[in-house]
Amino acid sequence: MAKISAALATHNEEGNITGCLESIKALVNEIVVVDGNSSDQTVKKALDFGAKVIQVSNDPMFHNMKQRAFNAASGEWILYLDADERVSKELATEIKEIVNMSEQEIEDYEKKVIASNKLFKRHQSLLEKRDGNIGESIGSYNAFFFPRLNYFLGKYLRYGGVYPDGVIRLFKKGKAYLPCKDVHEQMIVEGRVGWLKNDLFHMADPNFKRYLERNSRYIDLIVKDLVTKKIGKNPVQFINYFFLKPVWWFLLTQIRHKGILDGWQGIIFSFFSALRFSRAFWRYLVNK
């Protein structure tokens, strides 16, 4: 049986880490947590699960801490999670099966997974259009995307372009790494990247306060991009970012991507997601 190591980077996650580790305690052979000097009970709660905890100074480039956790893991496979993620029972069973399959068995399994949900490949194509090729077209399957369900104000969102929100969370040790240059970067994978079919639960925004905090960080990244691209601070761009882009995005997510089927949560998510354009441009305008 292949050995699986769980790897996490944390900072003040006492409210999340127990749920995360509870969901994988029967799945993994070891838990490695790199903690950025948490001031709460994060470390104690990790130790209660028998985790190997490495404490370091909290790094603004959080991926440095994640990569350190990968390096410290001893398993043949690494299950990489954020503290606010939960592995479903179905996904845990699927992980156990995939890490013990032969290459031919994985090949056959991947054909069935992709055939059963074409959204997966479509999502990966969009990521590759934005970030470049993910993995290689030949060779062994050394990493896997998980489809992720995001929790927003009491409901997991399935429409509005939010799902499957694929994230690479399982890989062979030494066959993937984080470049540690950007918080939204893709992993660099040596070999092919496949998909698992069962969902990873992401407790992203259980309340509106947390959503606004996370949304504000994303807006700062858009501002950074506007600065890099030297977008003009003129009436044309004002109209574009304050009116055209928000309206386009809201209609796209609500109508084309059927966000309205997620109920009032889907409408609110689309509305505030659309507002990120105008909020970012305003911060850009006042930025000196």
Image (tube, rainbow, N blue to C red):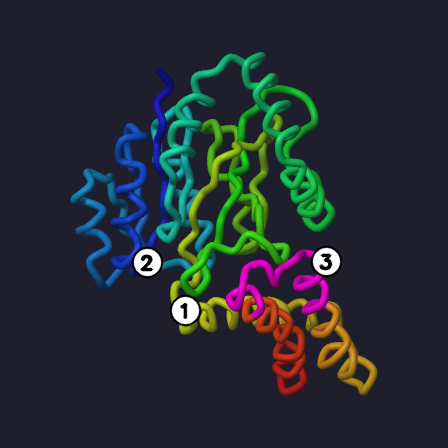
Whether residue 281 sits left or right of residue 109 in the image: it is: right
Tag 3 near tag 2, CB within 8 Å: no
**Which label is found at residue 11?**
2
Q: Nearer the viewer, residue 264 or 32?
A: 264
Q: Residue at x 27, y 45 (%)?
A: 54
Residue behind mark 1? 210
Q: Nearer the viewer, residue 94 or 282?
A: 94
Q: Residue at x 64, y 83 (%)?
A: 282
**Which label is found at residue 256?**
3
Query: Which one is earlier in the sequence, the residue at label 3 or at label 1?
Result: 1
Q: Residue at x 66, y 44 (%)?
A: 123
Q: Whole-percent x and y of residue 39?
A: 23, 64
Q: Nearer the viewer, residue 55 or 85?
A: 85
Amino acid bearing label 3:
Arg
Does residue 254 show up magenta in the picture?
A: yes
**Which label is found at residue 246?**
none
Amino acid bearing label 2:
His
For mark 2, give the secondary structure.
Answer: loop
Q: Magenta stretch?
A: 249-267
Q: Whole-percent x and y of residue 65?
A: 40, 49
Amino acid bearing label 1:
Arg
Q: Whole-percent x and y of residue 239?
A: 78, 82
Q: Residues within 10 Å of mark 1 (few under 14, many from 20)?
A: some
Whether residue 21 sits left or right of residue 222 in the image: it is: left
Q: Nearer the viewer, mark 1 or mark 2?
A: 1
Q: Residues within 10 Å of mark 2 (few under 14, many from 20)?
A: many
Q: Residue at x 59, y 38 (%)?
A: 188
Query: Which one is earlier in the sequence, the residue at label 3 or at label 2?
Result: 2
Whether residue 214 sits left or right of residue 229 in the image: it is: left
The answer to whether residue 29 is above or below residue 83 is above
Q: Nearer the viewer, residue 76 or 64?
A: 76
